[in-house]
Image: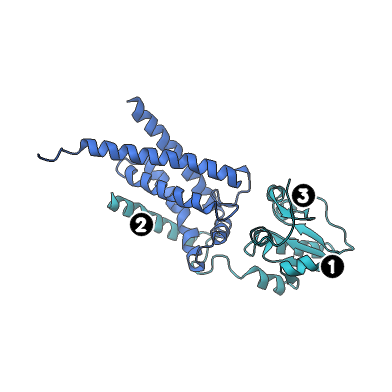
């Protein structure tokens, strides 16, 4: 049986390598997630912040860019839900007020939804937009602060 | 005969689940790579795991469905993968088990229950095959 296991592993290796090479969605073997979110946020002209800055903010509207199902399971306390995927699908939902600073976050530093939402908000005329780069994963796993759940 | 048919049904259930999981990851490889990265594996391993694991799921599924010769190996690989995937549920709030799809299928509690059922199926098949193999081996001389 070890030989048959090796055959299946080899088949998976060959198929996976070939498919990844020809697919337009193929990943880089060394950097599958590309440039980090913090670098992309700053390159786009937004402010990248951490949990400490978020906790220090009193007047900002915190916006959760994740799908609504994830928002319901857990979110930063006081955050409103504005899923980027809904906006991308043509269902913008209820946008935040324009007269307050905005802090956008999504799941973690590998998630791009927060940056895409920040760019959309910028296009809608919002000013003073920051992105909490480490996102919900750090807030929850690192017990950074209060949270809400449905 | 009835037991053999049950085994075949269980193989098909296991195979179709693995096939669905693998295809969903192949369709959105970046989302699965994010899930792999969130587990906390070494950064250098994220790319290879994200690229190859879905195809291993598909390969094992096809071996279970369409071959006789490789079913025993496929059952063992399926059991191994399921044990590892279930262990990752304890380290992250999502295992990425069905790629980047966000639905009730990816909720941690649902993922644990689903995986435990699949582990039970795979373990059952592996144990039954080992028993059948040991029964068919000739007895050692006195």
Q: Nearer the viewer, residue A141 or A45?
A: A141
Instruction: Specify the quadrant of the image occupied by residue A107.
Output: bottom right
Residue drawn at 83 percent across, 69 percent down: A128
Crowding near the residue tagged with mark 3, few <14, some 14–19, many ≥20 C-alpha atoms within 10 Å: few
Q: Are marks 2 and 1 on the same chain?
A: yes
Crowding near the residue tagged with mark 1, few <14, some 14–19, many ≥20 C-alpha atoms within 10 Å: some
Residue drawn at 37 percent across, 29 percent down: B5
Chain with blue colouring: B
Instruction: Specify the quadrant of the image occupied by residue A40.
Output: bottom right
Q: Earlier in the sequence, mark 1 or mark 3?
A: 3
Task: Point out residue B22 in the picture as x, y percentages from the top left corner.
Answer: 49, 49
- The answer to whether residue B28 shows anywhere in this view is yes
Identify the residue position indicated by label 3 in the image: A91
Identify the residue position indicated by label 1 in the image: A127
- The answer to whether residue B65 shows anywhere in this view is no
Name the chain under label 1.
Answer: A
Q: Name the quarter where the N terminus of chain B is drawn.
A: top left
Q: Nearer the viewer, residue A24 or B63?
A: B63
Colour for chain A in the figure? cyan
The CA distance from mark 1 to mark 3 is 22 Å
Q: Secondary structure at mark 3?
A: loop
B75 to the left or right of A31: left
């Amino acid at each position: 049986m070890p030989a048959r296991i090796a055959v299946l592993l080899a088949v998976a290796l060959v198929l996976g390598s070939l498919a990844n090479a020809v697919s337009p969605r193929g990943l880089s073997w060394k950097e599958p997630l590309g440039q980090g979110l913090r670098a992309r946020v700053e390159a786009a002209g937004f402010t990248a912040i951490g949990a400490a800055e978020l906790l220090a903010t009193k007047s900002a509207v915190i916006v959760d860019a994740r799908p609504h199902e994830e928002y319901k399971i857990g979110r930063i306390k006081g955050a409103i839900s504005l899923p980027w995927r809904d906006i991308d699908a043509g269902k913008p939902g209820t946008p935040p007020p324009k007269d307050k600073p905005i802090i956008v976050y999504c799941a973690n530093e590998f998630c791009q939804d927060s940056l895409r939402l920040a760019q959309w908000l910028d296009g809608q005329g919002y000013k003073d937009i920051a992105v909490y780069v480490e996102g919900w994963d750090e807030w929850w796993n690192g017990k950074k602060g209060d949270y809400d759940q449905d | 005969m009835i037991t053999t048919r049950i085994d075949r049904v269980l193989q098909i259930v296991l195979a179709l689940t693995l096939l669905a999981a693998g295809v969903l990851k192949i369709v959105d490889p970046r989302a699965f790579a994010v899930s792999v990265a969130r587990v906390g594996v070494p950064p250098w391993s994220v790319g290879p795991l994200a690229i190859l694991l879905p195809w291993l799921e598909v390969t094992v599924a096809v071996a279970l469905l369409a071959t006789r010769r490789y079913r025993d190996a496929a059952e063992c690989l399926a059991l191994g993968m399921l044990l590892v995937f279930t262990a990752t549920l304890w380290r992250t709030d999502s295992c990425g088990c069905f790629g980047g799809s966000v639905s009730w299928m990816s909720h941690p509690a649902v993922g644990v229950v689903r995986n435990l059922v699949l582990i039970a199926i795979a373990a059952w098949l592996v144990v039954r095959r080992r028993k059948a193999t040991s029964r068919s081996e000739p007895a050692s001389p006195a």
